[in-house]
Image (tube, rainbow, N blue to C red):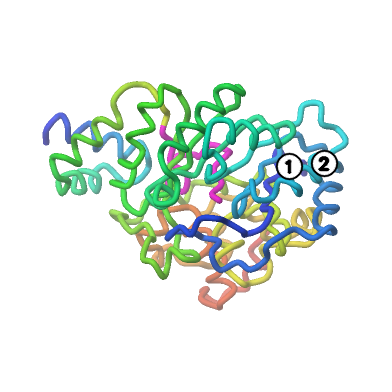
Amino acid sequence: MTKTDKIIVAFLVSMGLFSAKCAAEYVGKLSSGQKAAFINLTDGKQNTMVALNSSPQPVEDGKDN
Amino acid sequence: MFPRKVVINLGFKCNFKCAHCANSFQKKKKLSPDEIGLLISTINKYGVQRVQFIGGEPFLYLKDINRIIKGIVDNKSLEVSVTTNGSFARSYDAAITALSAVPHIKRIQLSYDKFHARFLPFSQVENLVLAVRAMTLKFSVLCSIQAPTDMLTLAPLRGLGHDFPILVQKVLPQGRAVESGAVYSSYGGFDGKVLKRRCPDRNSLVYFCGKGFSSCCSTLMLGSAENGFHFETAEELYRSRFYRLTSRYTFGEIAGKLGVSRDSFKPEHSSVCNLCGDIFLSEKRGFCDGFKADQRIS
């Protein structure tokens, strides 16, 4: 697994979308373009991302319309 | 019981027709005068200082928003937030005008994802962000995803030069999402950690137009015609077994009390709302293991 793959796996796990094992399988199926886009999304400190109806505790204002 | 926040669904009218919309089959368009009176008296009774408006599209209901807010007696520290599709932000000035029409507004939550992006040009997102910044409002983005790669729709937001939280939500099997095939399905397997969680909305009081009060804003409120999950008054909710269970126990504990076998959980139950809905509906529909659930609930 490349460093890029590991970063994306960690991101998807931190979002509560996958377990580490399932995230690795998922990332393995992504195209190089998709991986680059994910890296761009996770890069830098701006915009904290939080998952709602998955494993991490959500923030309070998560209501859809 | 004192709710920290009241979430008010003003009605199901919307000027978008998103493929994932959970509300698409809901009929009631508008709160009745009696419902508005009930909401005002409930907010005043509990002294709630945080009110969130959802829809439908709340900015199509500005008169009702103003009626409710004007009825709140103790509004010194009132914080109003609105979850919107941003359709009013056709220009910077239009965005300022619309936002200024909501008294005590402190926070805007924009629904933006691949579904909303079909109807909302990114230029309007930019208008809204500029207006929010000028009015020093708090801002967040709610992004619904059908698959993890849908998060990539959010990439342009990073270029706005404004730091704000992005909340990611899997599309649940409700409303139009079912018929359009937009339901999130990229579950790797059942994640047992979800059984240790409690309802994230247990401290909120939710009111849905034409339905009533609940602590549920999702599966059991929108995806089920079953009784027992929404109530005519807040007091009825707080006396209910549904509230007692969801406010006190983890989902694993609730499943045990309702006689739902842990062997029945599927990958999609990794989402709390899917899990909660199926636990309670399993009992309603007689899929439990034969014990009388009430006997096991303290």
Q: Residues within 10 Å of mark 1 (few under 14, many from 20)?
A: some
Task: Report which quarter residue A39 is drawn in.
Answer: top left
Q: Residue at x 67, y 70 (%)?
A: B227
First in residue order: circle 1 vs circle 2: 1
Residue B252 can be seen in this image? no
The residue under label 1 is B3
Instruction: Give the amino acid type for the residue marked by disc 2 in the picture.
Output: Tyr
Q: Residue at x 60, y 51 (%)?
A: B57
The mark found on residue B258 in the picture is none
Instruction: Give the amino acid type for the residue marked by disc 1 in the picture.
Output: Pro
Total numbered labels: 2
The mark found on residue B46 in the picture is 2
For mark 1, give the secondary structure: loop
Asked if residue A53 is among those painted magenta in the image, a careful observer would answer: yes
- Where the C terminus of chain B falls, by quadrant? bottom right
Q: Residues within 10 Å of mark 2 (few under 14, many from 20)?
A: some
